[in-house]
Amino acid sequence: MIDTNKIKMRYEDAKARFEAIGVDVENAMATLKNTKISMHCWQGDDVRGFLNPDGDLSGGIMSTGNYSGAAHTPEQLRQDADKAFSLIPGKHKFNLHAMYVDTDEKVDLNEIEPKHFEKWVEWAKEKGIGLDFNPTFFSHPMYKDGYTLAHPDSEVRNFWIEHGKRSRKIAAYFGKELNEPVYNNFWVPDGSKDNPIDRLSPRHRLMESLDEIFKEEYSENYTVDTIESKLFGIGAEAYTVGSHEFYMGYGISRNKTILMDAGHFHPTEVVSNKISSLSLFSDKLMLHVSRPVRWDSDHVIIMDDELQEIMKEIVRNGLLCRTAIGLDFFDATINRIAAWVIGVRNAQKALLKALLEPTEELREVELNFDFTTRLALTEEYKDLPFSAVWDYFCLEEGAPVGLDWYEEVKKYEKEVLTER
């Protein structure tokens, strides 16, 4: 049983300590409350979707494990997401892929329309959450020879171009209905398993295909187009058409928002070190916060150094208002709802920790080349009790404190998930 008085006492003590070094704790919590994390639908069903849930995964997609309780219908996925959101402080967003249609009509990816997602919009309105979207360029028979938008066959390309256009229309529909921008992310898995002779032509075809998809203008009040690079994927180990360099050039030249996924780079590269550079050339940016283990394995995010560095970079440079934060991992070896809750709460914790840093003082001593003071302050800051502020934030938001959320997940697993 949580002792609310002790939580409040610890918070007041922590608040005094943070305020002593110039941190506005109440403002930090208000900022955290107003920051929406985009929770990804594909953790709940192992990236199967409902367009063809029995089909084989392809396009570098793989979810390992067979933990019981995966969602098999849109209703089950919404039910599971509801449970996860109830255990996370604040109001957030749910990130849908196009293959998560909710309709009795037999429909293909190049035929989808807003009407096939009306139930998702009704649910989002009822729960007071936002939506994001993604066209699905994988797990489909028209993903041929490892290519979609970059395929040399125009029939294949045209199928996917039409899908991209329809996805943008659906994202704009979400934005109008929910009265907030929907980030619509284009990730295209095209590539080659072994070394190609011609790396240029597929990139030229991808560029032309994207140009055709993006011909129609949509207001960014409703939807924001984002484009996501990747270093490699399963079956595309040697060459990925949509590399980081490709999308940096494309995004900046076409005024599209660039999305960086924490697992989509070389093992020694980190997204945190790229954020400030990208911010100089792009009004907006989006992140997929994931955790690579040796490669782009999309593990559930933990409070590791890189997660904290990502949030520090955003806060220290005043970029939170320009940055959309989404999660991207899928793990079928553990309870899927627990994965969601751990991931979103860790993203929030890392952001809160960054918001509680005495940034202005650190910036001032650095500007004066006082690196000794900078090191002393940053090391001492690590010991300050940010967790007491986090517990109080959860209490204020009506979310479970500490591990109380896990008891709810275990109860839900016993009563709901194991019955599927």
Image: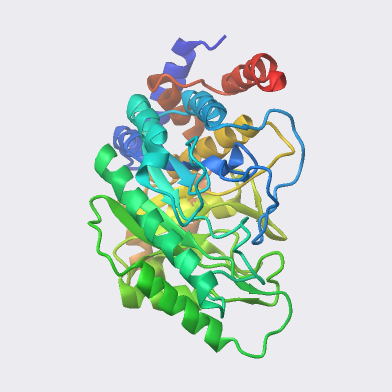
Q: Residue at x 30, y 46 (%)?
A: 173
Q: Is residue 293 left or right of residue 208?
A: right
Question: Residue 266: x percent and y percent?
Answer: 63, 70
Q: How many marks?
A: 0
Viewer-nearest residue: 24 or 113: 113
User: In the image shown, does 30 or 371 lie closer to the viewer?
Assistant: 30
Q: Is residue 249 left or right of residue 153?
A: left
Residue furthest to the front = 106
Q: Residue at x 32, y 39 (%)?
A: 31
Which residue ends up furthest to the bottom in the rendered image?
197
253 to 256, vertically: above or below? below
Q: Can residue 361 be seen at all in this image of the molecule?
A: no
Q: Is residue 292 left or right of residue 287?
A: right
Q: Which quadrant does the N terminus fall into?
A: top right
Residue 208, image x, y percentages: 41, 79
* Displayed quadrant of residue 29: top left
Q: How is the image coloured?
A: rainbow
Judge by depth and name the residue closer to the eye, 299 or 52: 52
At x 46% / y 22%, what residue is drawn? Answer: 399
Q: Which residue is at the front of the view, 32 or 390?
A: 32
Q: Which of the image's four quarters has the C terminus? A: top right
Instruction: Report the side of 280 relative to 243 (left or right).
Output: left
